[in-house]
Amino acid sequence: MMIAYFIIGCEIAFWIFVAAGLSVRYLLGMKRLGLALLMATPIIDLLLLVATVVDLQRGATASMVHGIAAIYIGVSIAYGHQMIAWADRYFLFWFKGGENPRRRKAYGSAHASQERNGWFRHLAAYIIGSAFLLIMIWWIGDATRTAAFSNIVRVWGIIVVIDFIISFSYTLWPKKMPAKKVE
């Protein structure tokens, strides 16, 4: 159960480092220190992976909680830059009077392209996370102790297929711009 608290702590630490990096970067004008804080976020992922492997090496049976660590790492690697860029845009909007990020809605082929790119990121997260899970299955070498990992890979694979269908459907049926209201 301790690993669950560590995963929660890592997620909190990730966003603390992002907020601190953006605050130092924009509010204090210390761009290098802000970038260093933002670049420290992968260290959190590494600590999470090490803690998971150590827990399993000590004899723990793999659980969904352990699997979340691999999912978290895959998502952080595949989406990390995009998540930080998202936070960066909102931080600029809220604290520096930047452009409102909500006004950047895409329609038609631009939206379809965004959806496809999002799916490719999801596929990358799946490949990375599943690779970590499969390596841990191999490392532990006990199918009964790592059955949860096999289930996670299977269920996540189904989710990736569903996401593919939804994401690529916008290529065939593009999202239309809402009609302007006439007053």
Image (spheres, rainbow, N blue to C red):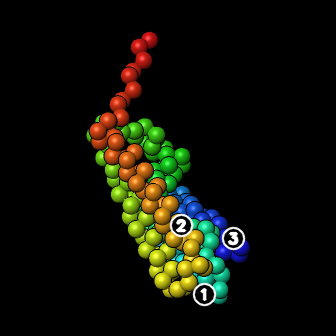
Q: Quadrant of residue 158?
A: bottom left
- Name the residue nearer the viewer: 131 or 125: 131
Other-residue count near label 3 (Cα within 10 Å), few / some / many at <14 / 14–19 / ≥20: few
Comparing labels 1 and 3, the label whose residue is closer to the camera: 1
User: Which is more foreground, mark 2 or mark 3?
Assistant: 2
Is 59 on the left-hand or right-hand side of 100?
A: right
Disc 1 versus disc 2: nearer the observer: 2
Q: Which residue is mark 3?
A: 5
Q: Is any atom of residue 24 visible in this view?
A: no
Q: Give the residue type that dot 1 points to.
A: Gln
Name the amino acid type tagged 3: Tyr
Among numbered discs 2 and 3, the one appearing first in the sequence: 3
Nearest the camera: 85 or 143? 143
| Residue at which label 2 appears | 151
Label 1 residue SS: helix
Question: Circle 2 sits in a helix, a strand or a loop, which is it?
Answer: helix
The residue drawn where x is 53% and y is 67% is 151
Which residue sits at x=43%, y=50%? 162
Q: Is residue 6 above or below residue 124?
A: below
Instruction: Residue 183: give its label.
Output: none
**How far apart are the two marked residues, 1 and 2, measured between alpha carbons?**
20 Å
Residue 146 position, x and y percent, is 57, 77
> Can you see residue 49?
yes
